[in-house]
Image (cartoon, rainbow, N blue to C red):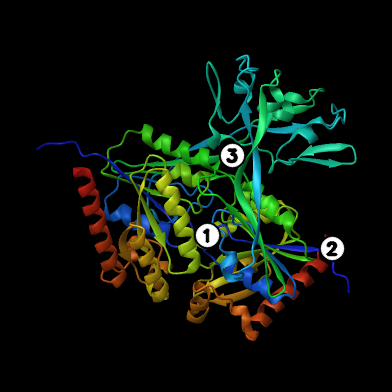
């Protein structure tokens, strides 16, 4: 039967940072021959450090909400802005009011309510998107400017830009951010699977529970890998039991492998290592799962 | 001796470099220091300071509620909202998930048709461990932004030395966590990923004129990316902690290595090193 291959989007997440999201995303991209992939960890992107490409990226500035500035020569020191701002973004020193750009969320209330028109709107670039376009692969990444808000919006922006390219791929891989807040929510939205990479520690488990809940709220199927499982076998067992008790799909575990941490690209990885053998098993299981779900 | 009130933040850029590991042990090693967990999306600090007596306060923000009788359908609130949290279908409706709680709609409504009601976004928990005040900000799952929880957690601290455990990244959350702190400790992993993200928080500290030093964690004894950079830029290396099975065993099971005198001395030394740096700096009053 000749049927169109539908796209499966897998977002790699962890809750806790530093569990190996980017390393695992990078291997998945290679092994699943993903032709479309995105680094959505816009506050600390790293995938571009290990994705070899010869092309220059197409760079675009991302304009978020404007910020505001008080024109001191027009200010009548009434303090209306100061008392209205819900973010406590307006500092008061004697009778001088200034806006802290890092606390300002751009709601524009001060601007609208200032009786002296002493507040100015300033358009600002909150970050950049980068698209690496090759014939057989499309790689998107983005970076927020330091201290800028709107990371969730930037995630949506880079995902939309990639979507608009209309490339065909069987698997789209998203390397996600840590945490459970707005950039994570923007990364999970409209994905099929959330591949959760955890580590055997009480912190890892605590964060895993929160990211599982987040995935379930957003109606994405969570599947779990325990990375560096041999570093604390007892806790690995505790995590496995938690997953079983809660009917969460467990794909398997990976050992601590010093080489993986030190090497920067896939060509240097040892395919014969235990790490890779286990990784291959995990990928096999994942593909079986995806195929089974598709049939339903 | 009366010490000035001092707050020290631990941040990293990349997640999982050991912010919580270093900051919990640091706080534990200094008498009556307060530990504040501002990593509200993944708060793990409390795991290391177990207590059966935890008090909790809710963190609330305001969202609008509409009085349908008074609403004239003038759209002023909808047109004002920069976050597209209000949609208009004959009258305004709130999409609560997108609301940033700026309260602007309430202030622009000329018909008194909007009142502000509380919405819980998380909580701040307080407990005591060996004479240390332990404060933990926790965001509820499904919420967008934990900034108000970070503010509230920091304001709860009462001792003279406040240790702030920050969220990862370089976003507005991190800026809120280091707002008004006296010193920043950058916990960095000596890997290419760690180094790349470290440079981002390094830029934050520089642009905010914060005094800072670095702790290299899980050091493999090989990679010199960070040490070379520190040497070149004259950055204080406060400590280098090797990757160590014993440390991992204790930490991953929720323990504190600073309960061992050898390590307590080590973190104490770090503290005195920081004090020395602060005194040498311009900001010391």
Q: Chain of mark 3?
A: A
Q: Give the Cα separation between the discs numbered 3 and 2.
A: 33 Å
Q: Chain of mark 1?
A: B
Please identify, in this view, whether the residue under mark 2 or under mark 1 is nearer the observer. Answer: 1
Placement of the N terminus of chain A among the 4 image quadrants? top left
The disc placed on residue B284 is 2
Q: x and y percent of residue B254 in the render?
A: 53, 72
- The residue located at (65%, 44%) in the rendering is B60
Report the residue marked by disc 3. A126
Q: Pointer 2: residues within 10 angstroms few (<14), some, or many (20+)?
A: few
Marks 3 and 2 share the same chain: no
> Please, what secondary structure does the residue beneath circle 2 have?
loop
Placement of the C terminus of chain A among the 4 image quadrants? top left
Q: Pointer 1: residues within 10 angstroms few (<14), some, or many (20+)?
A: many
Question: Of B40 and B227, which appears nearest the observer?
Answer: B40
Report the residue marked by disc 1. B15
């Amino acid at each position: 039967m000749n049927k169109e291959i539908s796209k499966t989007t897998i977002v790699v997440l962890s809750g806790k940072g530093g569990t190996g999201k980017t390393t695992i995303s990078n291997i998945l991209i290679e092994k699943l021959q993903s032709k479309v992939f995105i680094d959505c960890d816009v506050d600390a992107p790293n995938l571009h450090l290990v994705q070899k490409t010869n092309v220059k990226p197409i760079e675009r500035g991302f304009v978020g909400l404007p910020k505001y500035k008080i024109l001191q020569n027009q200010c009548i020191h009434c303090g209306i802005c100061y008392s209205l701002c819900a973010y406590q973004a307006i500092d008061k020193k004697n009778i001088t009011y200034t806006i802290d750009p890092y606390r300002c969320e751009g709601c524009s209330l001060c601007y609208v309510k200032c009786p002296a028109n002493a507040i100015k709107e300033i358009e600002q670039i909150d970050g950049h998107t980068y698209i690496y376009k090759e014939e057989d692969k499309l790689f998107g990444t983005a970076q927020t400017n330091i201290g800028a808000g709107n990371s969730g919006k930037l995630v949506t922006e880079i995902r939309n830009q990639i979507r608009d390219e209309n490339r065909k791929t069987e698997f789209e891989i998203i390397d996600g951010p840590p945490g459970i807040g707005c950039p994570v929510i923007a990364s999970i939205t409209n994905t099929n699977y959330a591949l959760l990479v955890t580590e055997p520690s009480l912190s890892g488990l605590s964060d895993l529970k929160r990211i599982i809940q987040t995935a379930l709220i957003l109606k994405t199927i969570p599947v779990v890998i325990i990375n560096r499982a041999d570093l604390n076998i007892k806790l690995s067992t505790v995590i496995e039991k938690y997953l079983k008790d809660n009917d969460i799909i467990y794909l398997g575990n990976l050992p601590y492998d010093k080489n993986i941490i030190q090497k920067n690209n896939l060509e240097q990885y040892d395919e014969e290592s235990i790490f890779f053998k286990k990784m291959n098993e995990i990928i096999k299981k994942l593909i079986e799962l995806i195929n089974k779900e598709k049939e339903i | 001796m009366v010490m000035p009130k001092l707050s020290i933040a631990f941040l990293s850029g990349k997640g999982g470099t050991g912010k919580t590991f270093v900051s919990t042990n640091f706080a534990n090693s200094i008498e009556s220091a307060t530990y504040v967990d501002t990593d509200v999306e993944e708060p793990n600090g409390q795991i290391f300071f177990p207590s059966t007596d935890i008090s909790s306060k809710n963190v609330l923000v305001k969202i609008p509620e509409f009085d349908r009788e008074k609403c004239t359908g003038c759209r002023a609130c909808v047109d004002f909202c920069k976050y597209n949290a209000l949609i208009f279908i004959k009258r305004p409706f709130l999409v609560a998930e997108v609301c940033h709680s700026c309260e602007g709609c309430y202030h622009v409504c000329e018909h008194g048709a909007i009142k502000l009601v509380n919405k819980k976004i998380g909580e701040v928990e307080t407990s005591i461990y060996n004479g240390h005040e332990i404060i933990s900000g926790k965001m509820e799952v499904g919420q967008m932004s934990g900034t108000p929880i970070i503010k509230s957690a920091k304001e709860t601290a009462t001792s003279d030395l406040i240790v702030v455990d920050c969220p990862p990244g370089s976003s507005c959350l991190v800026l809120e966590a280091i707002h008004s702190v006296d010193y920043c400790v950058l916990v960095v992993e000596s890997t290419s990923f760690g180094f790349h993200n470290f440079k981002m928080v390094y830029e934050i500290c520089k642009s905010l004129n914060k005094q800072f030093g670095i702790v290299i964690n899980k050091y493999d004894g090989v990679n010199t990316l960070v040490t070379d950079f520190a040497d070149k830029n004259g950055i204080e290396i406060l400590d280098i902690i090797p990757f160590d099975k014993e440390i991992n065993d204790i930490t991953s099971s929720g323990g504190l290595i600073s309960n061992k005198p050898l390590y307590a001395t080590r973190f104490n030394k770090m503290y005195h090193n920081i004090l020395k740096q602060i005194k040498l700096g311009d900001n010391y009053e």
